[in-house]
């Protein structure tokens, strides 16, 4: 059973669109995860629900550096905490506290009932959240893992093979298509313009054939008259 060429072409366009979409998504992930940090900003992934509904799980945020004196209550900031400052979390500033000539901030997650246990020095603040992209964090996590990169490459190869196969099926379907009545119509005979103008080989109109026959008869009569004389 052969699929109609139109159906094969539709499938091929769908696969083409998926392949282009995959390329654009990967490029977007590379820009967000690799190029944005080159501008001095930081791209982070929200890994918890403490800031819902403002920041959903899997949201990617772009954090801009901010001077300590510019931090205000209500800002969403990313900061380091814990032993050796290895932990990073993103919460909202609820209070700005000057202490010993420095500025400290009190933070709280929007979904949490209580504020964070301790205040944090602005020296440990990475920056203020300027851009949020929902669900883009899942893409960044995928592209940052070796297994994720292998998965994307395999998916791209599968789509390329599908495009190649569908193009082959489309060509075969068109080649094996039954001729239409328009294809079976006899085509009128034509004479090349150059040959017709030069009097070369090629079909000529019936009027030209009768003229040639008359001239031939006239030449034969002229020869006979010359021989009789």
Image (spheres, helix red, strand yellow):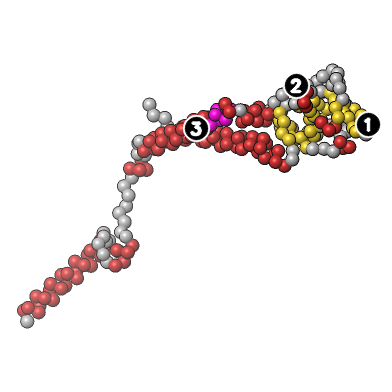
- As drawn, 66 above or below 50: below
Q: Is residue 219 magenta?
A: no
Q: Does the magenta stretch include residue 150?
A: yes
Which numbered tag is attached to residue 24? none
Pick the front one: 204 or 11? 11
Pick the front one: 12 or 144? 144
Secondary structure state at the residue bearing disc 2: loop
Residue at the front extreme, as displayed? 84
**From mark 1 to mark 3, how far is it between C-alphas?**
60 Å
Horizontal side of 136 relative to 91 (left or right) equals left
Residue 85: quarter of image: top right
Which numbered tag is attached to residue 100? 1
Q: In which quadrant is the N terminus drawn?
A: top left
User: Which span is picked out in magenta?
Assistant: 148-153
**Residue at figure coordinates x 23%, y 63% from the top left:** 209
CB-based contact (under 8 Å), mark 1 and mark 3: no
Which numbered tag is attached to residue 49? 2
Circle 1 Cα neighbour tier, 10 Å, few/some/many (<14 / 14–19 / ≥20)? few
Residue 75: quarter of image: top right
**From mark 2 to mark 3, how far is it between C-alphas?**
36 Å
């Amino acid at each position: 059973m052969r699929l109609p060429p139109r159906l094969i072409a539709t499938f091929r366009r769908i696969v083409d669109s998926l392949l282009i979409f995959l390329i654009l998504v990967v490029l977007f992930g590379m820009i967000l995860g690799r190029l944005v940090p080159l501008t001095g900003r930081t791209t982070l992934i929200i890994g918890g629900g403490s800031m819902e509904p403002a920041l959903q799980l899997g949201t990617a945020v772009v954090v801009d550096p901010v001077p300590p004196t510019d931090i205000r209550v209500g800002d969403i900031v990313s900061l380091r905490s814990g032993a050796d400052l290895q932990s990073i979390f993103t919460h909202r500033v609820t209070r700005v506290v000057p202490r010993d000539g420095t500025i400290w901030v009190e933070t709280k997650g929007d979904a949490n009932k209580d504020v964070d246990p301790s205040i944090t020095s602005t020296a440990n603040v990475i920056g203020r959240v300027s851009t949020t992209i929902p669900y883009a964090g899942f893409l960044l996590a995928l592209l940052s893992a070796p297994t994720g990169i292998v998965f994307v490459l395999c998916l791209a190869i599968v789509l390329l093979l599908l495009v190649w196969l569908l193009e082959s099926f489309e060509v075969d379907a068109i080649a094996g298509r039954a001729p239409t009545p328009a294809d079976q119509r006899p085509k009128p005979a034509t004479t090349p313009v150059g040959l017709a103008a030069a009097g070369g080989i090629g079909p000529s109109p019936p009027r030209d054939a009768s003229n040639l026959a008359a001239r031939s008869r006239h030449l034969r009569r002229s020869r006979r008259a010359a021989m009789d004389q």
